[in-house]
Amino acid sequence: MHRRPILALVPALLAAAAALPAQAQDKVLNIYSARHYQTDEALYANFTKATGIRINRLDGREDELVERIRNEGTASPADILITVDAARLEVADSLGLFQPVKSPVLESRVPATLRTPTWFAFSTRARVIVYNKVALKREQVQSYADLAAPALKGQVCVRSGSHPYNLSLGAAMIAHDGEAKTEAWAKGLVANFARAPKGGDTDQIKAVAAGECGVTISNTYYLVRMMRSTKPEDQQTVNAIGIVWPNQSSWGTHVNVSGAGVLKHAPNRDAAVKFLEYLASDEAQGYFANGNNEWPVVKTATVANKELAALGSFKADQLPIGELAKTTTQAQKVFDRAGWK
Protein backbone atom coordinates (compact mmCIF):
# COMPACT_ATOMS: atom_id res chain seq x y z
CA MET A 1 0.00 0.00 0.00
CA HIS A 2 2.95 2.34 0.69
CA ARG A 3 5.21 1.30 -2.22
CA ARG A 4 4.15 3.98 -4.73
CA PRO A 5 4.98 7.03 -2.56
CA ILE A 6 8.39 5.57 -1.65
CA LEU A 7 9.22 4.72 -5.26
CA ALA A 8 8.15 8.17 -6.29
CA LEU A 9 10.92 9.60 -4.12
CA VAL A 10 13.68 7.63 -5.87
CA PRO A 11 14.12 9.92 -8.93
CA ALA A 12 14.21 12.93 -6.64
CA LEU A 13 16.85 11.31 -4.40
CA LEU A 14 18.98 10.36 -7.39
CA ALA A 15 18.73 13.88 -8.76
CA ALA A 16 19.73 15.30 -5.39
CA ALA A 17 22.71 12.96 -5.22
CA ALA A 18 23.79 13.98 -8.72
CA ALA A 19 23.58 17.61 -7.72
CA LEU A 20 25.95 17.17 -4.75
CA PRO A 21 29.20 19.07 -5.12
CA ALA A 22 32.27 17.10 -6.21
CA GLN A 23 33.83 17.59 -2.78
CA ALA A 24 31.01 15.68 -1.10
CA GLN A 25 31.19 12.88 -3.61
CA ASP A 26 34.93 12.51 -2.93
CA LYS A 27 34.24 11.54 0.68
CA VAL A 28 34.09 7.88 -0.30
CA LEU A 29 36.83 5.57 -1.55
CA ASN A 30 36.27 2.01 -2.79
CA ILE A 31 39.23 -0.33 -2.41
CA TYR A 32 39.59 -3.87 -3.74
CA SER A 33 42.27 -5.48 -1.57
CA ALA A 34 44.19 -8.73 -1.79
CA ARG A 35 46.29 -7.88 1.28
CA HIS A 36 44.84 -10.02 4.06
CA TYR A 37 46.72 -8.64 7.04
CA GLN A 38 44.85 -7.65 10.19
CA THR A 39 47.40 -4.95 10.92
CA ASP A 40 46.36 -3.04 7.77
CA GLU A 41 43.16 -1.99 9.53
CA ALA A 42 45.07 0.88 11.15
CA LEU A 43 46.04 2.18 7.70
CA TYR A 44 42.42 2.50 6.63
CA ALA A 45 41.17 3.91 9.93
CA ASN A 46 43.89 6.55 10.13
CA PHE A 47 43.37 7.64 6.52
CA THR A 48 39.68 8.21 7.22
CA LYS A 49 40.51 10.08 10.43
CA ALA A 50 42.98 12.33 8.63
CA THR A 51 40.90 13.07 5.51
CA GLY A 52 37.27 12.38 6.35
CA ILE A 53 37.14 10.02 3.36
CA ARG A 54 35.22 6.87 4.23
CA ILE A 55 36.65 3.61 2.87
CA ASN A 56 34.56 0.78 1.49
CA ARG A 57 36.74 -2.29 1.15
CA LEU A 58 36.22 -5.55 -0.71
CA ASP A 59 38.72 -8.28 0.22
CA GLY A 60 39.41 -11.22 -2.04
CA ARG A 61 41.97 -13.30 -3.91
CA GLU A 62 44.02 -11.48 -6.51
CA ASP A 63 42.72 -13.38 -9.54
CA GLU A 64 39.12 -13.08 -8.38
CA LEU A 65 39.40 -9.32 -7.86
CA VAL A 66 41.06 -8.79 -11.23
CA GLU A 67 38.34 -10.79 -12.97
CA ARG A 68 35.66 -8.87 -11.11
CA ILE A 69 37.12 -5.53 -12.20
CA ARG A 70 37.25 -6.72 -15.80
CA ASN A 71 33.64 -7.89 -15.69
CA GLU A 72 32.43 -4.67 -14.09
CA GLY A 73 34.06 -2.61 -16.84
CA THR A 74 33.20 1.08 -16.94
CA ALA A 75 30.55 0.52 -14.24
CA SER A 76 33.08 -0.71 -11.68
CA PRO A 77 32.83 1.11 -8.33
CA ALA A 78 36.45 0.21 -7.52
CA ASP A 79 38.93 3.07 -7.19
CA ILE A 80 42.06 1.19 -6.11
CA LEU A 81 43.48 -2.31 -6.36
CA ILE A 82 46.03 -3.14 -3.68
CA THR A 83 47.88 -6.46 -3.67
CA VAL A 84 51.18 -8.21 -3.07
CA ASP A 85 53.87 -9.20 -5.57
CA ALA A 86 55.00 -7.43 -8.72
CA ALA A 87 53.82 -10.33 -10.87
CA ARG A 88 50.24 -9.83 -9.74
CA LEU A 89 50.40 -6.07 -10.22
CA GLU A 90 51.76 -6.61 -13.72
CA VAL A 91 48.86 -8.92 -14.59
CA ALA A 92 46.40 -6.17 -13.70
CA ASP A 93 48.47 -3.58 -15.55
CA SER A 94 48.80 -5.72 -18.69
CA LEU A 95 45.02 -6.04 -18.80
CA GLY A 96 44.71 -2.25 -18.84
CA LEU A 97 43.07 -2.02 -15.41
CA PHE A 98 45.22 0.84 -14.06
CA GLN A 99 45.48 4.45 -15.16
CA PRO A 100 48.60 6.65 -15.11
CA VAL A 101 49.12 8.72 -11.98
CA LYS A 102 51.27 11.85 -11.82
CA SER A 103 51.93 12.88 -8.23
CA PRO A 104 54.89 14.96 -7.01
CA VAL A 105 54.40 13.39 -3.56
CA LEU A 106 54.67 9.83 -4.84
CA GLU A 107 57.49 10.62 -7.24
CA SER A 108 59.54 12.25 -4.49
CA ARG A 109 58.94 9.59 -1.83
CA VAL A 110 58.75 6.26 -3.70
CA PRO A 111 62.12 5.36 -5.31
CA ALA A 112 62.10 5.21 -9.11
CA THR A 113 63.00 1.49 -9.06
CA LEU A 114 59.88 0.76 -6.99
CA ARG A 115 57.24 2.40 -9.15
CA THR A 116 55.87 2.41 -12.68
CA PRO A 117 53.73 5.03 -14.44
CA THR A 118 50.60 3.19 -13.28
CA TRP A 119 51.34 1.51 -9.94
CA PHE A 120 53.52 2.06 -6.89
CA ALA A 121 55.24 -0.18 -4.35
CA PHE A 122 54.67 0.72 -0.70
CA SER A 123 56.58 -2.03 1.12
CA THR A 124 59.25 -4.58 0.32
CA ARG A 125 60.21 -8.08 1.40
CA ALA A 126 63.27 -10.13 0.44
CA ARG A 127 63.42 -13.75 -0.74
CA VAL A 128 66.11 -15.37 1.36
CA ILE A 129 67.68 -18.80 1.78
CA VAL A 130 66.77 -20.70 4.96
CA TYR A 131 68.86 -23.74 5.90
CA ASN A 132 69.04 -26.36 8.64
CA LYS A 133 72.11 -25.57 10.74
CA VAL A 134 72.79 -29.25 11.43
CA ALA A 135 72.28 -30.61 7.91
CA LEU A 136 74.13 -27.93 5.94
CA LYS A 137 76.87 -25.35 6.27
CA ARG A 138 76.21 -21.70 5.48
CA GLU A 139 79.00 -21.76 2.87
CA GLN A 140 77.03 -24.30 0.80
CA VAL A 141 74.08 -21.96 0.17
CA GLN A 142 75.40 -18.48 -0.57
CA SER A 143 73.41 -17.91 -3.76
CA TYR A 144 70.21 -18.98 -5.50
CA ALA A 145 72.44 -20.86 -7.95
CA ASP A 146 73.80 -22.99 -5.10
CA LEU A 147 70.38 -24.54 -4.58
CA ALA A 148 70.78 -26.37 -7.89
CA ALA A 149 74.21 -27.82 -7.04
CA PRO A 150 74.37 -31.67 -7.22
CA ALA A 151 75.70 -31.73 -3.63
CA LEU A 152 72.21 -30.69 -2.43
CA LYS A 153 70.36 -33.59 -4.02
CA GLY A 154 67.34 -34.50 -1.88
CA GLN A 155 67.78 -31.40 0.28
CA VAL A 156 65.46 -28.76 -1.23
CA CYS A 157 61.92 -27.98 -0.09
CA VAL A 158 60.01 -25.28 -1.96
CA ARG A 159 56.50 -24.12 -2.76
CA SER A 160 54.96 -24.35 -6.23
CA GLY A 161 56.83 -22.94 -9.21
CA SER A 162 53.60 -21.31 -10.36
CA HIS A 163 53.35 -19.18 -7.23
CA PRO A 164 53.98 -15.48 -7.92
CA TYR A 165 56.73 -15.29 -5.27
CA ASN A 166 58.80 -17.83 -7.19
CA LEU A 167 57.82 -16.47 -10.59
CA SER A 168 59.13 -13.05 -9.60
CA LEU A 169 62.40 -14.62 -8.48
CA GLY A 170 62.59 -16.47 -11.80
CA ALA A 171 61.91 -13.23 -13.65
CA ALA A 172 64.80 -11.55 -11.82
CA MET A 173 67.13 -14.44 -12.67
CA ILE A 174 66.16 -14.23 -16.34
CA ALA A 175 66.87 -10.48 -16.33
CA HIS A 176 70.32 -11.01 -14.80
CA ASP A 177 71.45 -14.40 -16.13
CA GLY A 178 69.36 -15.03 -19.24
CA GLU A 179 66.66 -17.58 -20.01
CA ALA A 180 68.92 -20.55 -20.82
CA LYS A 181 70.93 -20.27 -17.60
CA THR A 182 67.75 -19.82 -15.54
CA GLU A 183 66.20 -22.92 -17.09
CA ALA A 184 69.32 -24.95 -16.31
CA TRP A 185 69.11 -23.69 -12.73
CA ALA A 186 65.43 -24.64 -12.45
CA LYS A 187 66.16 -28.16 -13.74
CA GLY A 188 68.93 -28.53 -11.17
CA LEU A 189 66.61 -27.27 -8.45
CA VAL A 190 63.92 -29.80 -9.39
CA ALA A 191 66.53 -32.58 -9.34
CA ASN A 192 67.33 -31.63 -5.74
CA PHE A 193 63.75 -31.73 -4.42
CA ALA A 194 63.30 -33.59 -1.14
CA ARG A 195 59.56 -33.77 -1.87
CA ALA A 196 57.03 -32.49 -4.36
CA PRO A 197 56.28 -28.77 -3.89
CA LYS A 198 53.45 -28.12 -1.45
CA GLY A 199 52.36 -25.58 1.13
CA GLY A 200 53.45 -22.00 1.71
CA ASP A 201 56.69 -20.43 2.88
CA THR A 202 55.97 -21.12 6.55
CA ASP A 203 55.51 -24.81 5.75
CA GLN A 204 58.90 -24.88 4.03
CA ILE A 205 60.61 -23.22 7.00
CA LYS A 206 59.10 -25.74 9.41
CA ALA A 207 60.13 -28.64 7.15
CA VAL A 208 63.72 -27.38 7.12
CA ALA A 209 63.75 -27.01 10.92
CA ALA A 210 62.35 -30.51 11.34
CA GLY A 211 65.02 -32.02 9.07
CA GLU A 212 62.57 -33.09 6.37
CA CYS A 213 64.81 -31.13 4.00
CA GLY A 214 67.96 -29.09 4.35
CA VAL A 215 67.17 -25.81 2.65
CA THR A 216 64.42 -23.62 1.21
CA ILE A 217 63.66 -20.07 0.05
CA SER A 218 61.23 -17.82 1.88
CA ASN A 219 59.98 -14.28 2.04
CA THR A 220 61.42 -12.48 5.05
CA TYR A 221 58.15 -11.44 6.66
CA TYR A 222 57.26 -15.10 7.30
CA LEU A 223 60.53 -15.48 9.18
CA VAL A 224 60.08 -12.31 11.22
CA ARG A 225 56.54 -13.36 12.09
CA MET A 226 57.94 -16.55 13.63
CA MET A 227 60.72 -14.63 15.34
CA ARG A 228 58.12 -12.41 17.02
CA SER A 229 55.92 -15.35 18.02
CA THR A 230 55.66 -16.40 21.68
CA LYS A 231 54.78 -20.00 20.76
CA PRO A 232 57.47 -22.46 21.93
CA GLU A 233 57.26 -24.45 18.69
CA ASP A 234 57.94 -21.32 16.63
CA GLN A 235 60.95 -20.43 18.76
CA GLN A 236 62.28 -23.98 18.35
CA THR A 237 61.92 -23.61 14.59
CA VAL A 238 63.79 -20.29 14.58
CA ASN A 239 66.61 -21.74 16.69
CA ALA A 240 67.08 -24.66 14.28
CA ILE A 241 67.56 -22.58 11.13
CA GLY A 242 70.05 -20.16 9.63
CA ILE A 243 69.30 -17.33 7.22
CA VAL A 244 71.40 -16.29 4.22
CA TRP A 245 71.13 -13.16 2.07
CA PRO A 246 71.67 -14.71 -1.38
CA ASN A 247 73.85 -13.29 -4.15
CA GLN A 248 75.69 -10.73 -2.08
CA SER A 249 78.74 -11.06 -4.32
CA SER A 250 76.72 -10.57 -7.52
CA TRP A 251 73.40 -8.81 -8.23
CA GLY A 252 72.02 -8.93 -4.72
CA THR A 253 69.09 -10.53 -2.93
CA HIS A 254 65.78 -10.59 -4.80
CA VAL A 255 63.25 -8.11 -3.40
CA ASN A 256 59.52 -8.07 -4.01
CA VAL A 257 56.75 -5.67 -3.05
CA SER A 258 53.24 -4.84 -1.96
CA GLY A 259 51.73 -2.18 -4.16
CA ALA A 260 48.64 -0.44 -5.47
CA GLY A 261 47.31 1.55 -8.39
CA VAL A 262 44.35 3.72 -9.32
CA LEU A 263 41.90 1.84 -11.51
CA LYS A 264 41.05 3.05 -14.99
CA HIS A 265 37.39 3.79 -14.30
CA ALA A 266 37.80 4.98 -10.69
CA PRO A 267 34.73 7.11 -9.80
CA ASN A 268 36.65 8.79 -6.94
CA ARG A 269 40.00 9.42 -8.58
CA ASP A 270 41.09 12.35 -6.41
CA ALA A 271 40.41 10.39 -3.23
CA ALA A 272 42.29 7.43 -4.70
CA VAL A 273 45.41 9.51 -5.36
CA LYS A 274 45.18 10.94 -1.83
CA PHE A 275 45.13 7.40 -0.47
CA LEU A 276 48.22 6.38 -2.44
CA GLU A 277 49.97 9.51 -1.18
CA TYR A 278 48.94 8.59 2.36
CA LEU A 279 50.49 5.13 1.93
CA ALA A 280 53.78 6.91 1.19
CA SER A 281 53.59 8.96 4.41
CA ASP A 282 55.96 8.18 7.28
CA GLU A 283 53.00 7.16 9.44
CA ALA A 284 51.61 4.61 6.99
CA GLN A 285 55.09 3.32 6.13
CA GLY A 286 55.63 2.60 9.80
CA TYR A 287 52.56 0.36 9.83
CA PHE A 288 53.93 -1.76 7.00
CA ALA A 289 57.14 -2.34 8.94
CA ASN A 290 55.79 -2.72 12.45
CA GLY A 291 52.50 -4.40 11.62
CA ASN A 292 53.41 -6.87 8.89
CA ASN A 293 57.19 -7.13 9.13
CA GLU A 294 57.89 -5.52 5.76
CA TRP A 295 60.44 -2.82 4.97
CA PRO A 296 59.09 0.64 4.13
CA VAL A 297 60.02 2.09 0.76
CA VAL A 298 60.36 5.63 2.14
CA LYS A 299 63.76 6.26 3.69
CA THR A 300 62.48 8.65 6.38
CA ALA A 301 60.01 6.14 7.86
CA THR A 302 60.74 4.85 11.37
CA VAL A 303 60.99 1.08 11.89
CA ALA A 304 60.18 0.04 15.46
CA ASN A 305 60.44 -3.69 14.80
CA LYS A 306 63.46 -5.17 16.56
CA GLU A 307 63.09 -8.60 14.96
CA LEU A 308 62.97 -7.11 11.47
CA ALA A 309 65.97 -4.96 12.34
CA ALA A 310 67.75 -8.05 13.70
CA LEU A 311 67.92 -9.49 10.18
CA GLY A 312 70.53 -6.83 9.47
CA SER A 313 71.44 -5.00 6.30
CA PHE A 314 72.02 -6.57 2.91
CA LYS A 315 72.70 -5.79 -0.74
CA ALA A 316 69.34 -5.76 -2.52
CA ASP A 317 68.75 -6.32 -6.21
CA GLN A 318 68.29 -2.93 -7.89
CA LEU A 319 66.38 -4.23 -10.91
CA PRO A 320 63.46 -1.83 -11.54
CA ILE A 321 60.27 -3.49 -10.36
CA GLY A 322 58.50 -2.72 -13.64
CA GLU A 323 61.13 -4.62 -15.63
CA LEU A 324 60.89 -7.53 -13.23
CA ALA A 325 57.13 -7.77 -13.59
CA LYS A 326 57.25 -7.98 -17.37
CA THR A 327 59.24 -11.24 -17.47
CA THR A 328 57.13 -13.32 -15.08
CA THR A 329 55.24 -14.99 -17.95
CA GLN A 330 58.58 -16.01 -19.43
CA ALA A 331 59.60 -17.38 -16.03
CA GLN A 332 56.47 -19.54 -15.88
CA LYS A 333 57.33 -21.13 -19.24
CA VAL A 334 60.89 -21.80 -18.05
CA PHE A 335 59.65 -23.46 -14.84
CA ASP A 336 57.10 -25.52 -16.75
CA ARG A 337 59.81 -26.88 -19.05
CA ALA A 338 61.98 -27.64 -16.03
CA GLY A 339 59.18 -29.60 -14.36
CA TRP A 340 58.77 -27.23 -11.40
CA LYS A 341 55.03 -27.64 -10.87
Image (cartoon, rainbow, N blue to C red):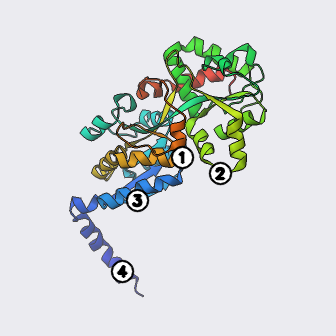
User: Does the image show residue 198?
Assistant: no
User: Does the image show residue 109?
Assistant: yes
Q: What whole-number distance in Å separates the C-alpha atoms at marks 2 and 3?
A: 28 Å
Q: What whole-number distance in Å separates the C-alpha atoms at marks 4 and 2?
A: 57 Å
Q: What residue is disc 2 on? A: 230
2 and 3 marks in contact (CB < 8 Å): no
Q: What whole-number distance in Å separates the C-alpha atoms at marks 1 and 2?
A: 34 Å
Q: Earlier in the sequence, mark 4 or mark 1?
A: 4
Image point (69%, 16%), residue name: 188
Image point (22%, 59%), residue name: 22
Q: Is mark 2 on a helix, strand or loop?
A: loop
Q: Earlier in the sequence, mark 2 or mark 3?
A: 3
State the image quarter where residue 186 is shown: top right
Q: What residue is disc 3 on? A: 45
The disc label shown at residue 6, or none = 4
Given this view, does label 1 or label 2 mark the residue nearer the observer?
A: 2
Q: Is mark 1 on a helix, strand or loop?
A: helix
Along the viewing direction, whichever of 174 and 21 lies nearer the viewer: 174
Classify mark 3: residues with Cα within 10 Å, few (<14), some (14-19) or many (20+).
Answer: some
Q: What residue is disc 1 on? A: 64
The disc label shown at residue 150, or none = none
- Quadrant that contains the N terminus: bottom left
Residue 121 at what x, y percent from top left? 41, 37
Image point (47%, 52%), residue name: 40
Residue 271 at what x, y percent from top left? 30, 52
Q: What whole-number distance in Å separates the C-alpha atoms at marks 3 and 4?
A: 35 Å
